[in-house]
Image (cartoon, rainbow, N blue to C red):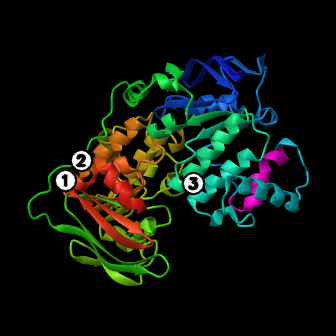
Amino acid sequence: MSTPTSVLSATGIRKHYGGAAALAGVDLQVRAGEVHCLAGANGSGKSTLIKILNGVESPDAGVVSIDGVPLQRQTVSGAINAGIQVIYQDLSLFPNLSVAENIAMTTRVAAKAKLVSLAEARRLARAVIDRLGLEIDVDSPVEELSVAQRQLVAICRALASDVRVLFMDEPTTALTWNEVEVLFGVVQRLKADGVAIVFVSHKTEEVFALSDYITVLRNGRVVAEGAASEFDRDSLVEALIGRQALEERNVADLKTHAADVLKVEGLGAPGLFADVSFSVKAGEIVGLTGLLGSGRSEIADSIFGIIPFTSGRVTVDGKPVRPGRVSEALKSGIAYVPSDRLTQGVFLDQSISDNMIASAIARFSNRVGVLRRTVIDRTIGRLVSDLSMKIGRPEDAVSSLSGGNQQRVVIAKWLATEPRVLVLNGPTVGVDIGSKETILDILRQNAATGMAVLVISDDIPELVAACHRVLVVRRGRLVDEIAGSQVTVDSVRERSIA
């Protein structure tokens, strides 16, 4: 069988930011009709390489070629015209525009159109949405969509053009299992049509389910590459982080007669969830899972006061928390790490230090409101160390950090409030295996101090690895509790989708 033709290639790509080398001589061949996994931990250089290949950044050295022809200067519009599309993690959508307008945007920009026909945009959007078998209103403003629906709109926008090379950076992060299957089917159809797919994922099961070829980056260099059949999970993880990672269950024994810290009794909000009751003890990590749309996130939002509950009650150490008031939840000792760190978790353009103290300003101010810099510096130093964060200076913008370190900044921001209850919604979404292990260890360490930890996630291996118990939500109700030796990947998955 003949070797597929290289549509896009990179040779000797180098890129520095200040004195740090983001890429140190990277070679990459992207072939027609092949799914190529670009793997690497956060900060390995994946995003920088994708930006260079897509014309967003210029390399300091090296050559980028399309169909074997070296490019003197790659631009975004030139990449689009050449059939290169990228779905970034931040999606890069226009929230105030409709679904149809967002989907049609790239093709209109590439065509340098001065006027946009809404009817044509609707027609194009409808064709792509139907191709994926989705149900999305093309006239809905994107800002009114869920995170999962926005992800699907970004995918549709990329597929609206005559794609030859499609980069997909963590495309399944916010998708349900059914939506992931739809996406995988689309990938296989595009592959059969000769489209080259470059797939970035931190989920090893996805890598092996889709990939024909794997390239692993670490510290800006290619450390392993070859046919997917030449790797297994252990060898891939070792290439990614330099050591083997274990996803075995690692749960500490609870203290005898540990007291309930968080107690939720008969909680309800019309149309969202009803009669939800559970507790989290001191030192306990409890998982809350279910399909997207099951009500799991709304329950977390309600505990933190974002969504008012209309029945039932929430107590912390026996004291009731007033519904619908975030300030009351904070005073009660509840901290909340949201699901979307880019829009809800951090101020990307602000400094790392300002982000880390943003939720605990009162703790770092004296009686006349002046910040106590010595206390702030000491706290930031401790949190950076405790969370194994890799940062330059505390004054640097959060946007300069990798995804894993941005997530640690979000967690640090809430740990700075010294909470009794830590609620985390998708705490390891979009982070690499090494960062995921670190974050789970952070949860275990804080639980060991007597904190109650509630984790909302559909990452079943993550729940199995860290949680004492797993609660299953379906259609807004708690339908199952899995504890002790019953907490296995198979049992949680089966009961979640039953």
Residue at point 24% right, 55% down?
486
Question: Which of the labelled discs sits on residue 445, or is there none?
Answer: 2
The answer to whether marks 1 and 2 mark residues whose Cβ atoms lie closer than 8 Å is yes
Q: What element carries label 2?
A: helix
Mark 3 is surrounded, within 10 Å at the Cα level, by few (under 14), some (14 to 19) or many (20 or more) other residues, namely some
Callout 3 amino acid: Glu
Q: What element carries label 3?
A: helix
Q: Position of residue 104 (x, y in %)?
A: 79, 52
Disc 3 from disc 2: Cα separation: 35 Å
In the image, is 60 to the left or to the right of 341?
Answer: right
Q: In which quarter of the image is residue 237?
A: top left
Residue at point 68% right, 63% down?
136
Disc 1 from disc 3: Cα separation: 39 Å
Residue pushed farthest bottom? 311
The answer to whether marks 1 and 3 mark residues whose Cβ atoms lie closer than 8 Å is no
Q: Can residue 100 be found in the magenta stretch?
A: yes
Residue at point 25% right, 51% down?
446
Disc 1 from disc 2: Cα separation: 7 Å
Question: Which of the labelled discs sits on residue 179, or is there none?
Answer: 3
Callout 1 amino acid: Thr
Q: Is mark 1 on a helix, strand or loop?
A: loop
Callout 2 amino acid: Gln
Q: Position of residue 384 (x, y in %)?
A: 35, 41
Q: In which quarter of the image is residue 210?
A: top right
The answer to whether marks 3 and 2 mark residues whose Cβ atoms lie closer than 8 Å is no
Question: Which of the labelled discs sits on residue 114, or is there none?
Answer: none
Q: Can residue 260 be found in the magenta stretch?
A: no
Quadrant in which the N terminus appears: top right
- Indicate which disc, 3 or 2, sits on the residue closer to the N terminus: 3
Q: Give the range drawn in magenta.
A: 95-109
Mark 2 is surrounded, within 10 Å at the Cα level, by few (under 14), some (14 to 19) or many (20 or more) other residues, namely some
* Above or below: residue 387 compared with residue 301: above
